[in-house]
Amino acid sequence: MKAQTSFSLGRLSRPWNLLTGALILGAQFAEGIELSIDDPSSIKKATKLVAKDLMSFYTGHRPGDVPGNLPAPYYWWEAGAMFGSMVDYWYYTGDDTYNEKTTQALQFQVGPKNDFMPPNQTSTEGNDDQAFWGLAAMSAAENKYPDPPDDQPQWLALAQAVFNTQAVRWDNQTCRGGLRWQIFSFNNGYNYKNTISNGCFFNLAARLAMYTDNRTYYEWADTMYDWTENIGLMTDKFQFYDGTDATNNCTTVNRIQWSYNAGNYLIGAANMYNYTKGAEQDKWKQRVTGILNATSVFFDPKNVDVMYEVACENNGKCNVDQRSFKAYLSRWMAATTKVAPFTADFIMPKLRTSALAAAKTCTGGASGNFCGQKWTTGSFDNSMGVGEQMCALEVMQSNLIGTVAGPVTNKTGGTSKGDPSAGTGGDTVPDTLSSKSITTGDRVGAGFLTTLIIVGVIGGAAWMIVS
C-alpha cells in the first residue's frame, strides 16, 4: 500500500477556518428548500421537511403491514439503511417525531435469534442486507438513541449478534478468506465476494472495538482490511471496487466504484485510527488520508465539491438501490470528523457545498419539497424516492455534526447493554429452500452479476455503467 501523509488538492495544507467558511457559505441560500448552511435552526427546519417526505414512503406501521418493511420497489436492506438515517435524524436534531416508528421497525425485524435474520427475509438475505440493519443498531448505541425496554433486544447486543453471525461465515475455502455476498449456497450470488458485504463487516468490527474496547473486534477489522487490499478489491490508490468471483479464486475483479464502499472503509479506518496509538495510529491515519483523497471520484469535477454517483448518475443508469448510495458516504464522512478530527477541514466544505446543492433540488412531489437525485443540476430532475430523500437528509443533517457530541463508548456514557455471545448459535437453513433469481435491482453491489459494459478509466479503474 502506498503511504499517504497529506491530503491532495491542498485541502489540509492550507488552513480552512470553519467559522470563516460558515460565513461565506452561509450567505448562500438554496432555491428549493431554504437552507442557510451556517444556521443550525435553518438546517433543522430543512431536514424536518426532508424527513417528513422520506417517511411518507414508509407503510410498515399501518394495520396489516409488516413493521420495518418498505413497499415495492424497495428491498429489505434499504429499509434498514433508512431507519439508520432516522436514528441519525434524532441524533442531529433532537426531534423524536419518528422514534416510535423507528424503534418498532428495528425491533420487529430482529428475528427469533435477535440477529436481524427474520423468517420473512432469511431465504434471500445477504450479508450486506443483514449488516445494514446491524449498523443501524450500532448507530443507536453510539448516539445514545433511547434504549428499548429491558425485555427487548438492546442495540449493542444486536450489533454484536450481527458481527458474530458473520465472523463464522469467514470463508477460507476460496480467495484466502473474506465473506460471500449471499449467506446460503442455494441463492444466486453465493459465489460473489462483494466489497459492500466485507466493508460493512469492517465498519461494524471497528466501531465495536471502539465502543467495547475489546481487542478481538479490532483484530477482525484489521484482518478484513488486509484481505480487502490483498485480494485486489482495494488499489494502492485506495479505490474500492465492487467485488470478485470465488469460482475462479477471486482472480478477476469487477472494477465499478460505488460511493458507499469508500464510505464504509473510511469510517472503519477512522475508528481504527481513534482506537490505536503510536505507530499503529500513524498507519491508520495514512489509510484514512488515502481513502479520503480517493473519494474525489465521487465529486463532480464540473461542480466542485458536489457529490455524485459517478458510475451511473450522469448517464441515468442508477437503479433503486444505487440512488441511495450517496447517503452512506455523506453519513460516514460526517461521522469520520468526530473520531478522526484531522479530516474535518477536508470533509466539511464538501458536505456543506453538497447540502446546498441537494437543497436546490427539493421542489418536487405533492409537498413541493421532494428532492431529486442529481445535485449537480441545480434543480429537481423528476427523480424521487426513498434513496433520493435519504441522500438529501443525510448530507443536510451532516452539517450539524459540529453541534452534537461524538459517539459514546461503554466508558464514556454509553447506556446500551451488550452481549458478547449474541448470535453465536450459527446459521439455520430456512425451511423454504427455493432459490430466488437475484439481480442488481434485488441486492446491493450486484453489478458483477448483470450484463455491464464497463468504460472510462480513472487511474486505471473502470467505473461507469453504460448499459
Image (tube, grey):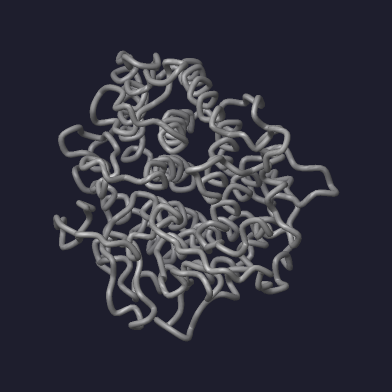
Which residue reaches farthest right?
151
Quarter occupied by residue 327: top left
Horizontal side of residue 332 vs 185, given as left or right:
left
Residue closer to the observer: 4 or 434: 434
Question: Can residue 342 be seen here?
Answer: no
Residue drawn at x 22%, y 53% is 467
Along the line of sight, which residue is nearer the eye, 395 or 266?
A: 395
Which quadrant would residue 380 be assigned to in this image?
top left
x and y percentages locating residue 144 in the rendered image: 67, 40
> Residue at 33% across / 52% down in the picture?
258
The image shows residue 269 at horizontal and vertical percentages of 43, 57
Q: In this view, does 453 lie above or below 327?
A: below
Q: Nearer the viewer, residue 330 or 208?
A: 330
Which residue is farthest front?
Answer: 434
Q: Can residue 116 be seen in this view?
A: yes
- As drawn, 274 above or below 255: above
User: Quadrant of the rendered structure where residue 196 is?
Assistant: bottom left
User: Residue 134: x and y, percent?
Assistant: 60, 54
**Left or right: residue 124 compared with residue 28:** right
From the viewer's perspective, tell me whether residue 112 is left or right of residue 253.
right
Q: Residue at x 54, y 24 (%)?
A: 52
- Residue at 49% in and 59% down: 200
Where is residue 466? Give x, y as percent. Answer: 20, 51
Q: Which quadrant of the figure contains the N terminus?
A: bottom left
